[in-house]
Image (cartoon, coloured by chain):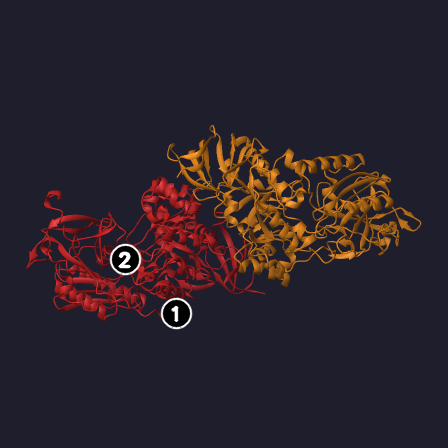
Chain colours: A orange, B red
Amino acid sequence: MPADLLLTGGRLVNVLSGEVYPAEVAVLGSRIAGISATSGVYQAQRTLDLGGQFLAPGFIDAHVHIESSLLTPAEFAGAVLPCGTTAVVSDPHEIANVHGLDGIRYMLGASDGLDLRVFVMLSSCVPATDMETSGAALDAAALASLLAEPRVLGIAELMNYPGLIAGAPDMVAKALLGHRARLRLDGHAPLVTGQALQAYAAAGVASDHESVAAAEALEKLRSGMQVLIREGSTAKNLDALLPIVTERNGRFCSFSTDDKQPDDLVHEGHLDHSLRRAIASGLDPLLALRMVTINTARHYGLNDLGAIAPGYLADMVTFADPRDLRVTRTFAGGRLVADSRRLLVPQRSTTPPPRNHVSAPGLSLASFALPATARRARVIEMVPEQIVTRAVTLEVPVSDGYAIADPARDLLKIAVVERHHGTGNTGVGLLKGFGLRAGALASTFAHDSHNIVVIGTSDDEMLLAVQTIVAIGGGLAAVRGGEVLGTLPLPIAGLMSDQPFETVRADMVRLLEIARELGCAHANPYMAMAFLALPVIPELKITDKGLVDVTAFKLVSPFDTTGAAEMPR
Amino acid sequence: MPADLLLTGGRLVNVLSGEVYPAEVAVLGSRIAGISATSGVYQAQRTLDLGGQFLAPGFIDAHVHIESSLLTPAEFAGAVLPCGTTAVVSDPHEIANVHGLDGIRYMLGASDGLDLRVFVMLSSCVPATDMETSGAALDAAALASLLAEPRVLGIAELMNYPGLIAGAPDMVAKALLGHRARLRLDGHAPLVTGQALQAYAAAGVASDHESVAAAEALEKLRSGMQVLIREGSTAKNLDALLPIVTERNGRFCSFSTDDKQPDDLVHEGHLDHSLRRAIASGLDPLLALRMVTINTARHYGLNDLGAIAPGYLADMVTFADPRDLRVTRTFAGGRLVADSRRLLVPQRSTTPPPRNHVSAPGLSLASFALPATARRARVIEMVPEQIVTRAVTLEVPVSDGYAIADPARDLLKIAVVERHHGTGNTGVGLLKGFGLRAGALASTFAHDSHNIVVIGTSDDEMLLAVQTIVAIGGGLAAVRGGEVLGTLPLPIAGLMSDQPFETVRADMVRLLEIARELGCAHANPYMAMAFLALPVIPELKITDKGLVDVTAFKLVSPFDTTGAAEMPR
């Protein structure tokens, strides 16, 4: 019988043999039926002449949080398919912190049937700590209920690496869960080296995407971990790590994006951006392509993905020039889904999201009051372009016994308002380095518990910003005086929009302009804000329960009552 | 806590990073606890100084029929562990043809707890054809009952490649069985190329060990199949295939032995022999070592085997010189099991074999009679060093209306006596090229149905040889006149001895001497005989049902009644 589609005139990038040669590829249904170096061997209903372009397997993102795009899985698919990405290994960690298993089930349901293959690693650290109030908690037994899902590939990044290394029972239980199911364990071990790394790897953790230095990455590769070289919107490790990749060890390296914002998806692209940067830096194009195809597929046991070979799923891309790799066509399951970076097949899902809870009962101006119990306060100081912060101790202005913001000195107030369970918890602190000179910004995209984080120049504006967030049912908001300057509603878990990609991007662009007008110089203030609530990244963070000294791993007072003698001036 | 064992003074062969460097390796229980490039980091109960030797992962045979060693799994383990082989991917195809599921269960049971890790692919072609009487038949449903066994890795070599390519329902059912369980399908596609190969690979067949030419192997690699380069007792493909292996594609190549006789295990070794030959031929030692370690482990989804890395099973070997790779020590699960090629830990199993059936009721001299219905007979002509035969048509001596042997012309009689079900089936034919000048040889090791194959210079001697086989309950026998010259009983399925490796080897050596004394010049007449009963290898073979024209795939008369005009003289 004739095939459905015959691709002629292409140069096949065979990532298995490491060769490029002219070949015709016959597709039947969703799979490759056969490949022939000579023409006339296969017949098909339709023939497409690739005009001498290269034909390579579709790209696979080895580690991504789809929620970071602020898009539904369908809209995310629509955004990345034209970039050549045809599969992602995702960790639904953000929505899991909001909705638990229902969140993961939503991501599975909402990605079912898309042209993008969405695989899922089961989020292993929900919540990240007990110093915050998350929407849900997932223990090993809860994760076990999803292990049999066909698109579940293992256990997601085991971020509590100190716990796993120390043999904490809950982390060990989650690791064993993966092992018993013969599935993969993903790692997250920033700066972990030596014996600690050996212990972490000995628990069976088989990948890591947190290396920032070449030596660190090479040590992980030597220790049996797939090195996922991350190039996202915030964390960019490609330049630092690329020097370790060789023809000989390259099979144990992959590319990932981790977190990528809508605007970056438009301006940079997705994995194609990593490929272009790597190849421009001198990496052999075939080696680079293997890092987004066969290497990642084989690591995760996806034995019919990542190559163009008979029986493999017909996920493919074309491009004209490997030295400036611009994807011209994307095929998913044998279907042309994008051409000239334009999506041809709308990506849709009818899976309803879980009911979102964004409430702050009893919230008032008093919620943001910060009674000054000492002259000197512990202040979160942001570090440009980093998600770590510094803990600094400063004298702060006091009015009527309350510490207040001082925008002229770039001293702002920050609060995290619990929004999942109506506890009324509000943690309040002081922040330096955000740069807002007027108004307030608020967001429910706040790692990892995704409460409402708000930063403002006055309590009134902070209250309005949070009220606005509650009113829109979660999302992002900017206010000044009594005026709401802009919002981006994120009704799905307070994390994702229900709007099309382009709408989200336009709204986001406008919100970023507003933030700049308000004086904030961060490239993406909302992304920067999101990490201020993450109490596993040093040094000083804030949750709904209060200020967290991450180094000491405990809640601390916003004021320093230990006496001026211990404080540097 | 201290580790159990610390290996110091070794040079670690890191097959992941492709590097060799001094390192200390700490072992706890059966696994690697940690590795350190500097000493003093790990403490252990016991320390072993490797004195500068190389430390590499234990070797994995990608495809082997243990039965071909004539040894039980335990004795096989004892024979190969000192050679550095610590794991095998086995196909219990021989015993499956005799005992069906009970045979596979026996191999699983008898290999349980050995220091050699025996993985099992489920035999997919039992029986090979319906032109023979096998001991058992296995359909997809039968195989399904063993899929959940932890050591079952997939479906064994799909030898009926014409059937699978044509979409034969039973073959498709077996392929689907493997796919649905996300397990591997092994291939067997000698000389299959072009569209036929594409169709075979498209069914998801992911390996092949039958390539005899470089171009054939490269085409298979390009098509997504792991190329298993076989170097066994009979089939030796290493020299022909090695030229295709490069740094770039080597990850998709592995070594296998397929079938190896006891004597060869002593004189050559096992996978270490392949390594020595490959390295002597110029293959980079690290690349060669990857072909018996990480490449094979990853292909079969054995994610904690094939490398020395934290959390991996501590299966390791040491050797002094990679250019002449002689294994000096073998560690299995952290335990030193062989030193200086001597087994330190006896390999034992108490699993009882299935009850063996070797009977030939009603057998008499008349069973071997060959009434001459025409002047010219179809004769099986052996091809030196090959398992293929030629079909030739010859005038044969006739006495009292019966065709008889003529040893002076190297024309012998051959018969296959059904031995499983007491059917009384006896196929009788004529054979050229075996070389026997007196007596008869018989064996129950007769591919694939393992009936009794007997070759003789007279019917009396053939009868005695078969009676001897029945008397010893299966095995090998040589007779002359009324005298039994020698036997090697194979009471386990008529395939394997219950005796120690050295006894089996000594018996085999003696039987080979006897065969030589009887005039047979084949290196191993019993191995050569075994393939004469295999009706899937061209051109003319014999089963208990009679002579098989393999090219026409049908049973034929031993006599040519089509008339002399069609016969070449």
- Is residue B307 visible in the rendered image? The answer is yes
Q: Position of residue B239 (x, y in %)?
A: 32, 45
Circle 1 packing at 10 Å, graded few (<14), some (14-19), many (20+), is some
Q: Position of residue A312 (x, y in %)?
A: 46, 44
On the image, numbered disc 2 is attached to which residue?
Answer: B447
Rendered image: mark on residue B349? 1
Q: Residue furthest right?
A: A400
Chain on which label 2 sits? B
Chain on which label 1 sits? B
**Amino acid marked by disc 1:** Ser
Left or right: residue B325 compared with residue A172: left
Circle 2 packing at 10 Å, graded few (<14), some (14-19), many (20+), is many
Residue A126 falls in which quadrant of the image?
bottom right
Q: Position of residue A2 (x, y in %)?
A: 40, 37
Left or right: residue B470 compared with residue A198: left
Q: Position of residue B259 (x, y in %)?
A: 32, 56
In the foreground, B176 or A155: B176
Q: Nearer the viewer, mark 2 or mark 1?
A: 2
Q: CA distance from mark 2 to mark 1?
A: 26 Å
**Amino acid marked by disc 2:** His
Do callouts 2 and 1 point to residues on the same chain? yes
Left or right: residue B20 compared with residue A277: left
Mark nearer the N terminus (2 vs 1)? 1
